[in-house]
Amino acid sequence: MLAGVRIPDENARPGTRAWLAVDHAPPGAIEGYSIQSSTRPGGQLELCVSTSPVARYVVVVFRLGWYGGDGGREVARTRSNIGLARSAPEPDPATGIVAAGWPVTDVIDIPADAVSGQWVAHLHLTTGPHAGTTALVPFVVRPRPDDRPAVLVQTPVNTVQAYNHWGGKCLYTSNSTGNVAAVKVSFDRPVPAWTESNLNAKAPFHYDVPLMRWMERCGYDVGYQTDVDTHRAPWSLVGPRLLVTSGHDEYWTREMRDGFEAARDRGTCLAFMGANTAYWQIRYEDDERTVVGYKSFRGDPETDGANKTCQFRQLDPARDEHTLLGVQYGRGLTHPRKLFDYALDEAALDDPWMAGTGFHEDRSPVAEVVGYEWDGLWPGHEPPGLTRFLHYDGELGPAACIRWTAASGARIFAAGSLGIALALDNWTRKLADARIQRLVANAFDDMTGRE
């Protein structure tokens, strides 16, 4: 199948809204995690599942996308299995890490013709007092090794684990037991029940899904991989014409940052479609199944100042985020339900990316897209070739949606806010804005060379 045809053909298949139209399981009723954050077409997904009390369940696998607006397609369904109750070990007293270490209970074969994308496994109880309820296990199917999609999207699984407090610990004091954060967190554990999870631990079901639906609706030739995949294989960034970060992509390794900078310096365009991106540097252990994040230059026992787990701007030498994105996080933070408006920068109206957007006729603000975190231009460090399309100048700090041009000629687009994805599609909140949809389409078309 020719590149660029795969996504339209996939999304022409019959879809279903069952992928998210679920009754979420109560705490502990059924929960699980995957041994792999991503897999490949023709590969396997290994799941570790617990039910309490003992009950039967089935696994139903969906690929997420557009599908005529339904947002997903059922790809696989297992036979009924019997779940057993598994326990959570106590956090390690030194690091706080909680690794479940459960046995593999289900192995899902991924079809050889599977299309790269964001997928989700439903763990659906069929018997017991909580029959009919479901837990979700997201994962990614990577492109085939010989595929070269025009757009490669990085999904932020590191951030999920940073905020995942299953077992009582995460990288934040606010939802760790005793208000003592862990300095290491494991991929080998579920996320808490839907009603107990932090918003960021629920990814990709908030900021990532609207972007994904919009890209696939537009028919872009898209491939997906996780940030773990980028770390393991930074050469995977060679080939796509546009690299996209999705949602709250806050936690990066040194290798990820190196890979993105090298791609930019080769002329590859970048689109940062969230905010607070590449803010904390982390390391991996245990074959990339453990995230190390001391969040302190002095507190990290690592002796190499360039490899500390702290803010990138605190490293030695410093690697301020604005040198990659053009903007960076300042004080831009509010409650997830409180969003602010982006105002038009009228100086950008004659820019080619503004063609057909409707901003010339309707210059009103773009409602409720700034938050819950956002990035602004850094005074005295404005990037070269800067164009500012949208801005917010509130008391909590500025935000800016910009384009700039690297020395290699690569164009870099920074949305400047987590909420910008909400203006692309109405799935999460009814905030879609045709002006933003056209602006981002113009940007993607230019950066990929799509006519």
Image (cartoon, rainbow, N blue to C red):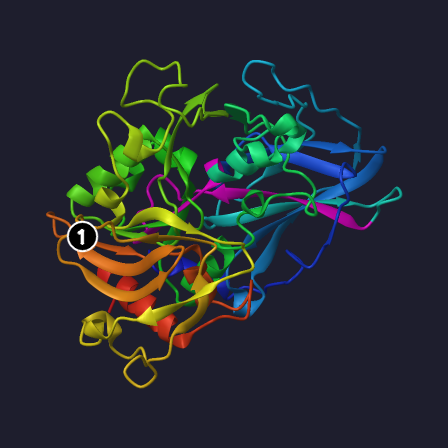
Q: Residue at x 65, y 56 (%)?
A: 20
Residue 267: x, y in percent?
16, 48
Q: Residue furthest front?
A: 395
Residue 114: x, y in percent?
49, 48
What amino acid is at disc 1? Glu
Tally of marks? 1
Judge whether residue 416 can be spotted in this image: no
Residue 417 in which image quadrant = bottom left
Q: Is residue 393 above or below residue 40?
A: below
Q: Residue at x 36, y 19 (%)?
A: 298
Q: Is residue 93 magenta?
A: no
Residue 282: x, y in percent?
40, 28
196 vs 29, left or right, is left
307 vs 186, left or right, is left
Q: Is residue 353 above or below residue 212?
A: below
Q: Residue furthest left?
A: 407
Where does the magenta region start and end? 132-158
**Considering the image in quadrants, where does the C terminus appear?**
bottom left
Q: Is residue 271 above or below residue 436?
A: above
Mark 1 Cα-neighbour bin, 10 Å: few <14, some 14–19, many ≥20: some
Residue 120: x, y in percent?
59, 47
Q: Is residue 139 magenta?
A: yes
238 vs 210, left or right, is left
Task: State the residue in front, 391 or 214.
Answer: 391
Q: Residue at x 73, y 47 (%)?
A: 134
Residue that mark 1 sits on: 382
